[in-house]
Each structure stands twice: as structure tokens, then as C-alpha cells.
Image (cartoon, rainbow, N blue to C red):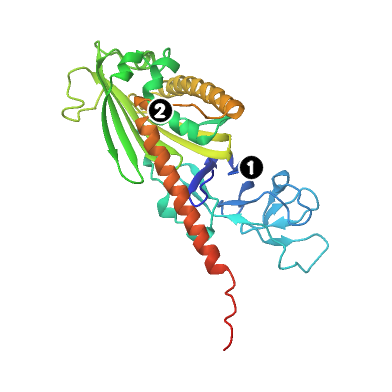
Amino acid sequence: MFILNTWYIAAWGHEIADKPLARRICDQPVVLFRDLKTKQIAALEDKCCHRAAPLSMGVVVESGLQCGYHGVVHDCAGRCVHIPGQDKIPARAKVRAYPVVEKNEFIWIWMGDPELADESAIVDYPFNDDHRNWPHHRGFYHIKAGYMLMVDNLMDLTHLGYVHGSTIGGNPQTHVEALMDVTKTEDSLKYVRWMLNSVPPPTYLAAVPFKGRVDRWQEFEFSPPSNVLQWSGAVDAGTGARENGNRSGGFSLRIFHGLTPETENTCFYFYAPANGYRPEDEAATAALMDHISEAFMEDKLICEGQQARLDELGDGGLVDIVSDATRVQLRRIIRRMAEAEARQNAARAQEAAPRAAVPQA
């Protein structure tokens, strides 16, 4: 199930330089490239209008993207603008172009109806642009699991003590007994998990010299259908983190999690761990990236194993438990989005259908 009328992350901005980049999004082949003159990003259907060769096998030239088979050139709007040895270009010589926006270091793409593409609907994440206070490294994984399994994983953190015991997890019981402050609407979900007076996990101890036990938080905001914004940290226990909102000092990190569906059962995972505890220390930022990437590899392995079993045996007989509350809510949000899009598509199709002739009296 793909929701098309929404924005997905197609790539990191730095991935698109002087060569085209091929990527499959919502099971559609896409090629991205950067205009040599304006440096603007373009995204086209990855199929030359001449003989269907992948445009991603071509090269970027001043007038657009040149096919590597016969030299046909398409501009950023998908129009054919040059055919070697031919002056007249047929009007139908073009390929589909997708709306794209470069924002907060990400390249966002709209796979649905281009008339509905609204840039203001792209989630704001200014921390990626604030390198002084939130320095970060850029991460990317190809996941052999559907994007919704990864979103489930991020929005249910009771797994941390079991999957990430040696990294960011800590004691499993600490997570099970966490206090939850939840805010939800029809189309949004946000929660803060508090683990008061708990033992700091290994990753936190490696970064900050705590006095002993800590008051720890994990703040997660679901930006449907496939992005999660995280702010996690800890301060010395008893210093008023939950009661007074005092989260300064101690350990603090922010992570943008972006999941983009490649196919029904595979996805791309974009993430950016930002160092909010020693922002002036590049070594600390690099170490944070190493720790987080190690933990996310653990998530990758468990979700890929989960997808393999679902592909083999199906989801019959699965049961929900108490820790699934947020997962169930986010699945409802995604389902409502899919249903609303289906109704919208049906209405547009009905409007476009030719009207039956009215019999004359």
C-alpha cells in the first residue's frame, strides 16, 4: 500500500552532484539530477522517451539529462529538447517529471498528482541546517523490509532493552515501566517516555560523565506517513527534567528518521543523529554517529527478519499487546490517509469520465 499524494525523501542533497542518481520509489523507477546552470534538482521517470533505456545510465549536460543510448536529451521538466541529427522534436517526446524540493539537506519528492503538491506540507526540521548547535552526520540504509515495519519499530521503544542492550537500550524493565505522556489527534501522534532515576545506557555513559542515575526521556513525533522526529537525552536524576522542563546539560541528541518505500517489502532509511551535548567536539559527533549506526543496524536486522517471516507465513494469528498502543494509532493514521486518497482519486476519475448522452424527447 503506497500513499502517493505526500512527500517522501528521495535522497540526501549531497548524493546528487555531477552524475544522475537512480532510485526506485513507491515501486516506480526515478532518476534524479542537478541542473548544471541553476543547480536545481530534477526528478524524471527513469525511461528515455526514445527506446526506454534508463536515463540514469546517461550523463548530465547543460541542456538536461542525455540518454546514454542515442544521445536524446530531456530537460528538467521531462521534455525532449535535443535529438542528434534531427531538428524537429515530436510534441509527445517527453517523460514524466516529479515535483521535487530541496529542504533541510533532504531532496523531497511527490509521487502522486502534481497539482496537489504543496511545499508547505513538508515537515520542518531546522536542526539539519543548524550545524553550530546540532552538528550531525548523514546516514542511509537500504532495508529489506516494508517502511511501515520500520515506522512501527521507531514508535514502539519497548524493544530497546532487548534489541539494543549493549548500545542505546539499557535495562529492559526500565523501558517497560517508562512513564508515557501522549498527545494524539486524527492525523498526528507524539509521545514522551520518561525513565526516571534509571541507569544510563552505555552510549550515554560514553558521551557524558553522569554522577550516577539519570532522568531520561525519549520524545518521538510521528509525521505521517513515514517520518519520525526524535529528541532523546538524560540529565542527572532529581534535577527537574520532567517536573520543570529542565533538560539542559547532560546528554541530548536529535535524530530525523525518514523512511521511503522502495517496494512493498523494501525501503530506504535516511537518518541524521545530531550532537546536542558537545556540539563543538567533532570527535563526539563522529562517535555518536558510530553508536547510533550500530544500533540502527540492529533494528535493520530484526525488521528484515520480521519481513522474511511475514512474506513466508503471513500475518495470521498475530496478537497486539499493551506496548502496541502507539503502533496501532499510527497504523490508523496511515490507513485514514490511504482511504482519503482513494476517495479523492475516485472523485477525480468520476469528474474526468465522459458524461452519458442525455436521450432527446
Q: Which mark is residue 160?
A: none
Q: Judge left or right: residue 154 versus residue 74.
A: left
Q: Residue at x 52, y 50 (%)?
A: 4
Q: Secondary structure at mark 1?
A: strand
| Percent position of residue 252, x then y | 32, 26
Element class at badge 2: loop
- Residue labelled with disc 2: 320
Locate residue 348, reporting x and y percent.
52, 63
Q: Position of residue 338 (x, y in %)?
A: 47, 48
* In the depicted structure, whether residue 112 falls above or below residue 217: below
Q: Quadrant of the C terminus?
A: bottom right
Instruction: Name, please, the residue furthest toward the bottom.
Output: 361
Lower position in the chain sequence, tag 1 or tag 2:
1
Badge 1 vs badge 2, beta-carbon distance below 8 Å: no
Q: In the displayed image of the protein, which residue is found farthest to the top?
A: 212
**Residue to which mark 1 is pinned:** 21
Would residue 131 be seen by someone viewing this image from the given angle? Answer: no
Q: Is residue 201 above or below residue 273?
A: above
Q: Nearer the viewer, mark 1 or mark 2?
A: 2
**Residue 267, placed above or below residue 198:** below
Label 1 is placed on what type of residue?
Leu
Percent of width and height locating residue 352? 56, 68
Residue 242 visible to the viewer: yes
Say which residue appears at 75% left-offset and 67% top-offset: 90
Judge the density around disc 1: few (<14), some (14-19), many (≥20) Cα neighbours within 10 Å. many
Hey, what amino acid is under mark 2?
A: Asp
- Alpha carbon distance from label 1 to label 2: 40 Å
Pick whichever, 337 or 17, lies toward us.
337
Q: Nearer the viewer, residue 277 or 3?
A: 3
Which image quarter holds the N terminus?
A: top right
